[in-house]
Amino acid sequence: MSGKTFYIETFGCQMNVHDSEKVIGTLMAQGYAQVETPEAAGLVLYNTCSIRDKAEQKVFTRLQNFKREAGKGKVFGVLGCVAQQEGEKIFDRAPHVSLVAGSASYTRLGEMLVQLEAGNRRVTGLSLDTGETFDTPFTRRDNPHRAYITIIEGCDKSCAYCVVPFTRGPERSRTSESVMAEARRLAEQGYTEIQLLGQNVNSYRDPSPAAWDFATLLARIAEVAGIRRVRYTTSHPRDFVKAIVDAMDANPVLCDHVHLPVQSGSTRVLASMDRLYTRDDYMRRIEWIKTARRPYSITTDIIVGFPGETEEDFQQTLDLLDQVQYDSLFSFKYSPRPNTAALAMGDRVPEEEKQRRLVILQEKQRAIQIQRNAGLIGETREVLVEGRHHSLGQWIGRTSDNRTLNFTWDSPPGLSSSDLAGKYLPVLVTRAGPNSLVGECATVV
Ligand code: SAM
Ligand code: SF4
């Protein structure tokens, strides 16, 4: 391998982004240097996503593009969910790949690198049979203000459409002591925002005798000195208990936002998805949030075109949008995935119909967002400054309720453009679009 250099590209969710930060830290601790292009690297890694077919195909396109590079002594590795799902079949499909490892095996990454360095060209890490979580002292974080902390890995649910339980294995929670120690260390290093991660953070259960549940963990993390914002993702409605809303209400460090994926507004479809709640159960949780002491933004995930979804079911999802008034949502066309229960279900919705439903859903949500965001004009919101749009002459801010609020600020002479990043500032909202807000900051920093 030439000169111990590596390139990594990450696909998919925040869990993958954070896994890559840990992988990068581990590689650097083993003497590897990160480079910006695959051409410049000795080791090329793809941390992959297989949640939908389109995401999965991306990695094979990448590998195909760089096939010729393999001849130049490069080593290729496929990490993450596609690696776990396809396993050794990847060696057949892309013979220039030498490493195939799923996230449950990253604790063995150092060992796997040693094998690659020794010239082994068929190195695998595919066991899901692990009680361990991938905690590493070497995490290399990209954002200087916001840090991810994994609190739980894997998933014990079995949603009929979802590949995650097969690619990330069973649930494993980290000890509260280890999570708290990481939060304190991050605060000491100057991070002010923490995002707790897991496929289902609500089912967090401290494996140590303290036995904290998720609401307790949230409350304690919010008390760490120096931490000004705490977010978490993802919740599962079945495990989203009232104590979570109570903990949020009790401490404004816990951000004004709940992402509560619903998937469908039809109880019939929810049952066939095996989501373990009804529409009424879901609405009860929305009521807890809406009747809380301070306002929270609410966002969700929706799948259209699940097998057997009728026009009537779809109308119920549209009706749910009217009822809840989400601040934002992620919407997907159902994509059949290997190993999942939904594969065997009949009544497939044709592709054009899925597309039609997706467009209708997105148009409806766009109208809701235009109206909700317009209601914020004239209000002042605190933002964490994330960066700058040089071309627009605007700073990029994020509100506690997870909106993008771009703003202008008349800098006093002598202050450089990087001076605002990481600061918390009050911004007056002056304009609103469907996906973001625009405002002005008059504060002298
Ligand atoms: N664990 C989280 C949860 O329970 O919501 C996140 C799972 S997944 C990474 C994020 C979203 O992708 C899901 O909420 C779902 O809407 C969507 N999704 C998962 N599998 C899908 C599939 N086979 N087809 C289309 N969308 C899918
Ligand atoms: Fe997938 Fe359901 Fe687990 Fe979320 S809760 S990761 S959708 S199986």
Image: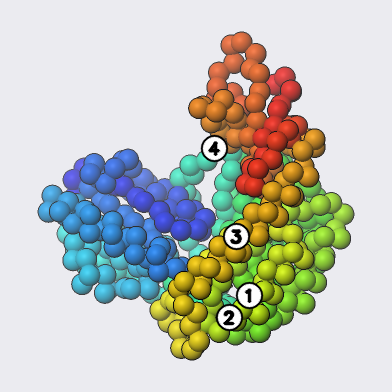
Q: First in sequence, mark 2 or 3: give its number.
A: 2
Q: Nearer the viewer, mark 3 or mark 4?
A: 3
Q: Is mark 3 within 8 Å of ligand 1?
A: no
Mark 2 surroundings within 10 Å by alpha-carbon count, few (fewer than 14), some (14 through 19), many (20 or more): some
Q: Is mark 1 within 8 Å of ligand 1?
A: no
Residue 180 placed where, x, y %? 65, 53
Residue 290 placed where, x, y %? 82, 60
Residue 217 placed where, x, y %? 71, 59
Mark 4 surroundings within 10 Å by alpha-carbon count, few (fewer than 14), some (14 through 19), many (20 or more): some
Q: Residue at left 50%, top 58%?
A: 13
When the figure is inspected, residue 12 is found, relative to residue 439, above or below; the finding is below
Q: First in sequence, mark 1 or 4: give its number.
A: 4
Which residue carries the number 1 mark? 314
Q: Quadrant of the C terminus?
A: top right
Query: Which kind of residue does numbered mark 4 sit on?
Result: Pro
| Disc marking residue 309 | 2
Q: Are marks 3 and 4 in contact (CB under 8 Å)?
A: no
Residue 104 visible, this orientation:
no
Question: Which one is in front, 300 or 436?
Answer: 436
Q: Are marks 2 and 1 in contact (CB under 8 Å)?
A: yes
Q: Residue at left 50%, top 79%?
A: 349
Res. 441 image quadrant: top right
Query: Which kind of residue does numbered mark 2 sit on?
Result: Glu
| Disc marking residue 415 | none
Q: What's the coloring here? A: rainbow
Q: Secondary structure at mark 4?
A: loop
Q: Secondary structure at mark 3?
A: helix
Distance between the Cα atoms at labels 2 and 1? 7 Å
Which residue carries the number 4 mark? 144
Which residue carries the number 3 mark? 362
